[in-house]
Image (cartoon, rainbow, N blue to C red):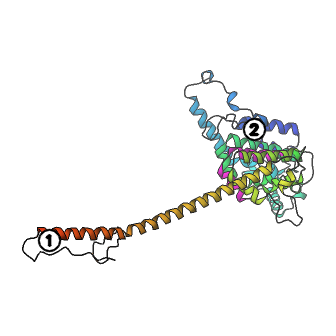
Amino acid sequence: LLFLLATEADAGVLLQASEIMRIILDTDMMGDHGPMNTGFADEAEGIPPSGGHNPPHDQHPNPTGSGNTTSSEQNNFLSMFYEHYIQWLAAPFQYTILYPLLRIPRSVLLGEVKSSLIDTMEQKWEQGSYQEEPLLYRVPFSALRSSFAVELLSFCVRAHVYRMKFYLLRSDVLGKVLKLLKPSSLPRNTSGDRCLKLAALRFLRAILSVNDEFYHRHIIQHDLFGPVFDAFRANPVGDNLVSSSIVEMCDYINTENIISLIEYIVTKHMSATGTETPLPSLEDVSSPYVNTLTCLRQAYEKLIHEKNSRHQSHGIDQKFEADSESGGEAHSRYFHENHTGRERVVMNEKALEDQRKYREIDQEESYFEADDDDGVPLPPAVDEV
């Protein structure tokens, strides 16, 4: 099936092979989260919810103990597929595919002694002269074939969230798919170019619908929205599916408030920079028809304003705390007691007056209550400062 998807040119055969592959890969597994639901099976894109076609538990031919066995088999199948076969889905648009015109016996391929014919084919492949090799067939590029492959990748993004995330983050498949949006990236202009571009945009939209920050950082790090907005400027906004899909994608980013992507789009791609000829901004291109890009810029300005307000309020709080600490220190000087006796007691005028009156009253009482002994010492005076 994968060989047919990578080499076949007939649209009917590609459609049937693609549907069979989708049924095989629809294992009702969403990572470890159970069956697929409507959140990951978009009926508008032709992906039916997989939970509805399975028989109930009581109608299962072997309900007791069969769930664990089925789950284990599905996990083993997915592990095998993502380890050995997932790269075949990216082969139609990522690699140059060659296959021999003559059937080579298995004993020759796996034999201990290599065949001279295979050695010759490998040498010509390494030298790049395989075009003149009559025994090798070079599969021509087909936009229709590539679009079927990209659609299957979009299905895998929704059906196998974690496994597909690990595969995409450690490869450049997403970048290869989005480069198909550039007209110069296609060998020639064919009738399936628009289908391929729409499939590439649906693939990116499926990744954004997962709403995973790892995907967002991957997109920003490799500047993967560059081909998207190049296609947006190249395709007139209006009655155009490509530009409408891009506008819907930007509206989704704004609605879901994906801050990292909003900042990335506005600062990196809102105005065209680094080009020889001046290009209109994305806002100017879309403003006659929709205000989605304007809303995106306003959302970014709102984020900047909130960030500045937080910084200012944080600075005011710090200043208030510093003033409070300095005021507390100044206030404590009036009541600070020095237990070592090396510093004088600092008092205000009212405290000095109260102490002077107390000393006079104490001296008068001592005069009347003292014995005849004149040696009674008076309380020591407190230094006044």
Residue farthest toward the left in the current orientation of the protein: 372
Image location of residue 368, percent across then percent down: 13, 68
Q: Answer above or below: position of 126 versus 110.
A: below
In front of the other: 261 or 163? 261
Prevalent SS, magenta region: helix
Q: Residues within 10 Å of mark 2 (few under 14, many from 20)?
A: some
Residue 14 location, quadrant:
top right
Q: Answer above or below: position of 21 versus 222.
A: above
Which quadrant is the C terminus positioned in?
bottom left
Residue 332 location, quadrant:
bottom left
Do we see residue 211 in this rendering? yes
Q: Which element type, helix, strand or loop, lies under badge 2? A: helix
Q: Does the residue at mark 1 contact the one at mark 2 (Cβ under 8 Å)?
A: no
Do we see residue 112 in this rendering? no
Q: Answer above or below: position of 168 versus 357.
A: above
What kind of residue is marked 1? Tyr
Q: Which mark is residue 367?
A: 1
**Residue at which label 2 appears:** 21
Residue drawn 82% across the image and 45% down it: 245
In front of the other: 29 or 40? 40
Which quadrant is the N terminus positioned in?
top right
Range of residues picked out in magenta:
198-222
